[in-house]
Amino acid sequence: MLTEDGKHLYVSYDEYHNLIEKLAIKVYQSHWAFDTILCLARGGMRPGDILSRIFDKPLAIMSTSSYRADSGTVQGKLDIARFITTPKGEIAGKVLLVDDLADSGHTLNAVIAQLRGSYPSIIELRSAVIWTKGVSTFEADYSVETLPTNPWIHQPFEGYDAMNPDQLMEKWKI
């Protein structure tokens, strides 16, 4: 649900999973046959996992990080892992790159540049995201929702960003 001021988008677990299913349908309807799904950790892990299961394709993981301060709400310096974790040797062939959103576009543009420069065995690369913000400099091959404004997306699991084990113990009275 987008707030009236356009600054916040609140997403429930059901809405989140429905959007991932819609993303899967968009990829499927394109009739593009790919070999591997590469998700960007952390935001792309949940969509990547679900797409991996739906398409029965191996899931590779590349860790990136830029949101660290204030419980993950302030963007900082972009860090991209030097290595990709994949169950089938080195990543190769046709790869579907998955993230949750194209925010500024900085992360996805940087990751694609690194993949194209460091992984010549990737013969085709396409991208899939749930949301694309109007301010993004990146246009994914597959996207479910375009957000004309630049809202903060409150994903259903972000409450864990501000939780620690002691708080969890208190919640469960352990």
Image (spheres, rainbow, N blue to C red):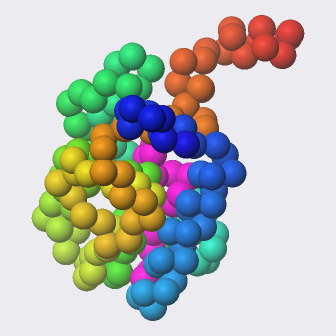
Direction from residue 10 to residue 112 in the image, left or right: left
Give how far across and how far down residue 101 sits, in percent: 38, 51
Q: Is residue 112 visible?
A: yes
Q: Nearer the viewer, residue 56 or 76?
A: 76
Instruction: Write the residue at 38% across / 25% down.
Output: 73
Residue 53, relative to residue 101: is it above or below? below
Can you say which quadrant of the picture contains the C terminus?
A: top right
Give how far across and how far down residue 2 sits, in percent: 48, 41
Direction from residue 26 to residue 78 in the image, left or right: left
Instruction: Write the residue at 40% across / 55% down.
Output: 131
Give how far across and how far down residue 57 sits, in percent: 55, 75
Q: Is residue 40 magenta?
A: yes
Q: Nearer the viewer, residue 118 or 138?
A: 138
Q: Quarter of the image holding residue 61? A: bottom left
The number of callouts visible is 0
Q: Is residue 155 visible?
A: no
Residue 91, relative to residue 49: is it above or below? below
Give how far across and how far down residue 128 sits, in percent: 39, 66
Q: Nearer the viewer, residue 158 or 54?
A: 158
Which residue lies most toward the bottom here? 31
Direction from residue 109 to residue 15 in the image, left or right: right
Can you say which quadrant of the picture contains the N terminus?
A: top right
Residue 107, relative to residue 94: is it above or below? above
Which residue lies most toward the front here? 4
Q: Tell me the magenta residue range.
A: 33-48
